[in-house]
């Protein structure tokens, strides 16, 4: 097991993801502990928010939350979503994009995705509008931006709010503008599977200055405690509906260490992403798979490296083949319009042909910060071996 000839590394298990530690997380948590200020909205929360705001630029306020889901729920509360209001969103997304609005009685209206970026197809939005449409919830899949110019101009014409589910989009941009800052509200996630992490965690970027006051109130259980803590008022009281959306200082301390390393973390992920991209070009040229497509307006953050294979059966075989080599590649979302809750609470706008086709052919390859090139080579080598096998061996007799 200790020999370094390669047999160890060949058999070593390759997980899909490994949480990356920047180095100072525990130090900051120890400091929060020593200072004895552990509840939310303390010094670490404020430092993390300030750093996020600096990184994002353009946001009127940034509030840390205990998850990306919580940030989306805050967005639905801030937009005053009422029963029957419709929110247009992709079906190919995480449940929280829809659930946050359904909790307010909103109705998700699912539209199809573009075959290149797997983001909501902006050309299908006009057909999905009804008099009940209130908002567009856009999801930047894999940290690659939606066509925001087209989306924002349609929203502007129709008076619709735009919420960005930028859970995967921190440190990525569209025409130089950071994701999360383009809509009136942007939700970020720091879940351990994302690029920048705090176990569970998130943030709401409030980009519309008219929403900041109420955002702080909703964040602090419906009270004006945030303004009380700034010394602006001498007592705090119940002002509006709200909940407890703050993370503790322990979480904020951990996150601060990650945020300080955000540029290095993003650069590392992009390097691995490009390594896959360069080395899989040949398999794409030979028609075995399709690599991710990043439009020129989009700077990604290397969050996901995915490939599309030629059929759902081939996906199953390939995942099994990789597992046989201790490589844990995974698929992604089961489309919401075909899920039990998606059918109960939402509806599809038109046929979602691209979604129905692509979700079943998508594979995400192992990618985490701090992996070594040997691991990338093993994954790439396994893909090459899979496609080099005679069709018979693949069970396609
Ligand atoms: C991760 C993710 C979320 C949820 O974030 P949590 O922090 O896990 O609550 C929402 N939407 C998308 C697109 C995500 O990838």
Image: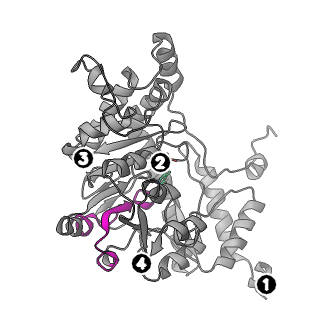
**Label annotation for residue 67:** none
* Earlier sequence position, callout 4 versus callout 2: 2
Assign a secondary structure to mark 3.
Answer: loop
Q: Which residue is mark 4?
A: 349
> Which quadrant does the C terminus fall into?
bottom right
Q: Which residue is mark 2?
A: 69
- Closer to us: mark 1 or mark 4? 4
Assign a secondary structure to mark 2.
Answer: helix
In x, y percent, where is residue 174?
Answer: 28, 58
* Earlier sequence position, callout 3 versus callout 1: 3
Question: Cα distance, mark 1 to mark 4?
Answer: 41 Å
Q: Which residue is mark 3?
A: 207
Assign a secondary structure to mark 1.
Answer: helix
| 110 with respect to 387 (left or right) | left
Do the CB atoms of the residues marked 4 and 2 lie less than 8 Å apart?
no
In x, y percent, where is residue 360?
Answer: 60, 74
| Residue under the point 36% across and 35% down | 222
Is the CB atom of the residue marked by disc 4 within 8 angstroms of ligand 1's nearest atom? no
Task: Mark 4: give few (<14), some (14-19) or many (20+) Cα within 10 Å.
Answer: many
Q: Residue 212, relative to residue 382: is it above or below? A: above
Q: How many marks?
A: 4
Question: Cα distance, mark 2 to mark 3?
Answer: 18 Å
Task: Mark 1: give few (<14), some (14-19) or many (20+) Cα within 10 Å.
Answer: few
In x, y percent, where is residue 93?
Answer: 49, 62
Assign a secondary structure to mark 4.
Answer: loop
Residue 53 vs residue 195, the one in the foreground = 53
| Residue under the point 31% across and 68% down | 133
* Earlier sequence position, callout 3 versus callout 4: 3
> Does residue 171 appear in this view?
no
């Amino acid at each position: 097991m200790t020999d370094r000839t390669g047999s160890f590394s060949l058999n070593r298990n390759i997980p899909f993801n490994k949480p990356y530690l920047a180095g100072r997380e525990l130090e900051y948590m120890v400091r929060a502990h020593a200072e004895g200020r552990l509840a939310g909205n303390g010094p670490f929360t404020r430092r993390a928010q300030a750093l996020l705001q600096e990184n994002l630029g353009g946001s009127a306020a940034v509030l840390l939350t205990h998850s990306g889901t919580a940030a989306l729920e805050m967005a639905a509360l801030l937009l005053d979503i009422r029963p029957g209001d419709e929110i247009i969103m992709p079906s190919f997304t995480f449940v929280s994009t829809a659930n946050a609005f359904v909790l307010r009685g909103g109705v998700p209206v699912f539209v199809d995705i573009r075959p290149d970026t797997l983001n909501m197809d902006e050309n299908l939005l006009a057909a999905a509008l009804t008099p009940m449409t209130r908002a567009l919830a856009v999801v930047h899949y894999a940290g690659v931006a939606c066509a925001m110019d087209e989306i924002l101009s349609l929203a502007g014409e129709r008076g619709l709010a735009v919420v960005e589910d930028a859970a995967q989009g921190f440190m990525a941009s569209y025409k130089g503008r950071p994701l999360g800052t383009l809509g009136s509200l942007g939700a970020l996630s720091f879940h351990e599977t994302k690029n920048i992490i705090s176990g569970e965690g998130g943030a709401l970027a409030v980009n519309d200055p008219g929403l900041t006051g109420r955002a702080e109130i909703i964040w602090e259980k419906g009270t004006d405690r945030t303004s009380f803590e700034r010394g602006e008022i001498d007592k705090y009281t119940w002002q509006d509906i709200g909940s407890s959306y703050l993370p503790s200082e322990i979480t904020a301390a951990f996150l601060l260490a990650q945020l300080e390393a955000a540029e290095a973390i993003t650069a590392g992920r992009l390097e691995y992403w490009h390594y896959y991209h360069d080395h899989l070009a040949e398999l794409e040229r030979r028609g075995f798979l399709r690599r991710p497509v990043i439009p020129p307006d989009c700077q990604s953050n290397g969050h996901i490296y995915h490939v599309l294979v030629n059929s759902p059966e081939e996906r199953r075989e390939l995942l099994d083949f990789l597992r046989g080599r201790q490589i844990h590649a995974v698929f992604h979302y089961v489309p919401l319009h075909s899920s039990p809750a998606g059918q109960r609470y939402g509806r599809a706008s038109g046929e979602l042909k691209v979604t129905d086709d692509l979700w079943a052919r998508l594979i995400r390859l192992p990618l985490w910060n701090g992996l070594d090139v040997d691991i990338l080579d093993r994954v790439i080598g396994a893909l090459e071996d899979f496609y080099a096998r005679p069709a018979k061996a693949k069970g396609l007799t």
